[in-house]
């Protein structure tokens, strides 16, 4: 498949002037090892498609002898999506999965009815030091899949479809976009893509998905007549015509999909359509009924 043609005029046509619904400024949160910039959930929007949580961490330099240590903790009702631009993380979970993840690879962990995992800096990189930079997202599961069996999937960089032409580069990470479908198994109609544009290049964002968002990682873009700066999450109106123009070399993420089948309750690391399921998960973690993480049994994050 090829990327869509950009019609003239590129930017500022009347069809796209009112295309932006929200420009979300992420909140800064301290998670111990470093700060994160949390774009979802926000006051403006709880979700964009199934995306209910969207954090950027770094870039931060981890000095020699230090590292990231996200101790074992539980999840229900969601899938975690880890995407790195720099650094390496070692994932372990209660299924027995052990997987390092590097930039350009995908870790997709489906919590379903319940899973426990940890994310740490590998021993070698703890000794050497490294820069950490990436995104952690949560994708809410449809009601019919909230109690599915937990699962973990790692997708190598070479397995993901890439479209490239005329100063435009798009890697489809999950779901379907521009006629390409990523190999990771998802449980709802969605899309997630990593996009790089050279200065002056432009990319249409098709209206095929009802809820669409763009997170600008670096650079400067113009969309619907507005300039967007790095670190902002843009939520677009349904069915609006969107064309993104790079005012300088730019890097952004595209995300969204069909609306979730109702609102979700979020408490700590738990997401569910049911408050009762969250209360049950809290009690299971408090009383030690979740499965442990093999190889990382000595520590855990207590219930808040």
Image (cartoon, rainbow, N blue to C red):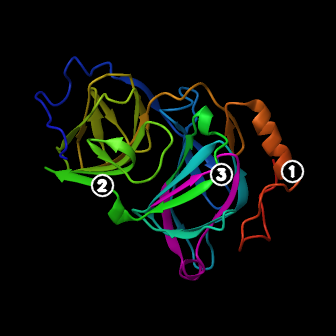
In the rendering, which numbered label is found on residue 286? 1
Q: Nearer the viewer, mark 2 or mark 3?
A: 2
The residue wearing badge 3 is: 30
Q: Dot 3: what SS?
A: strand
Residue at the spot 52% in from the left edge and 59% down from the top edge: 153
Measured as percent of width and height from the top left, residue 36 is found at 57, 51
Q: Is 254 or 141 nearer to us in this picture?
A: 141
Residue 228 picture quarter? top left
| Quarter holding residue 272 | top right
Q: What kind of element bears circle 2?
A: loop
Write down the residue under mark 2.
161
The tally of labels here is 3
Does the rendering let one see residue 121? yes
Of badges 3 and 1, the one in the foreground is 1
Q: Give percent across and percent down for residue 18.
A: 32, 18
Q: 212 left or right of 92?
A: left
Q: Residue at x 53, y 32 (%)?
A: 47
Residue 60: percent from left, percent from top: 52, 63
Q: Nearer the viewer, residue 128 or 190?
A: 190
Q: 38 or 178, which lies in front?
A: 178
């Amino acid at each position: 498949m090829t990327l869509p043609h950009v019609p003239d005029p590129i930017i500022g046509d009347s069809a796209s002037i009112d295309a932006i619904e929200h420009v979300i400024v992420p909140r800064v949160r301290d998670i111990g090892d470093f700060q994160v910039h949390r774009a979802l959930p926000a006051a403006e929007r709880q979700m964009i498609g199934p995306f209910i949580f969207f954090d950027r961490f770094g870039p931060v330099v981890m000095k020699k002898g230090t590292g990231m240590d996200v101790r074992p903790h539980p999840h229900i009702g969601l899938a975690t999506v880890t995407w790195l631009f720099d650094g390496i993380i070692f994932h372990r979970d209660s299924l027995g999965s052990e997987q390092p993840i590097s930039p350009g690879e995908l870790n997709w962990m489906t919590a379903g009815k319940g899973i426990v995992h940890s994310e740490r800096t590998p021993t070698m990189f703890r000794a050497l030091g490294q820069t950490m930079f990436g995104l952690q997202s949560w994708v809410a599961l449809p009601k019919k899949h909230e109690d599915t069996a937990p699962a973990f999937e790692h997708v190598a960089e070479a397995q993901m479809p890439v479209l490239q032409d005329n100063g435009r580069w798009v890697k489809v990470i999950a779901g379907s976009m521009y006629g390409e479908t990523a190999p990771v198994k998802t449980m709802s109609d969605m899309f997630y893509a990593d996009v790089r544009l050279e200065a002056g290049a432009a990319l249409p964002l098709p209206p095929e998905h009802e809820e669409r968002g763009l997170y600008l990682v670096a650079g400067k873009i113009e969309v619907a007549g507005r300039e967007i700066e790095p670190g902002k999450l843009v939520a677009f109106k349904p069915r609006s015509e969107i064309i993104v123009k790079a005012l300088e070399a730019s890097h952004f993420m595209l995300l969204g999909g069909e609306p979730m089948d109702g609102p979700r309750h979020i408490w700590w690391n738990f997401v569910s359509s049911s408050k009762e399921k969250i209360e049950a998960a809290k009690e299971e973690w408090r009383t030690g009924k979740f499965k442990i993480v093999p190889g990382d049994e000595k520590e855990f994050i207590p219930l808040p």
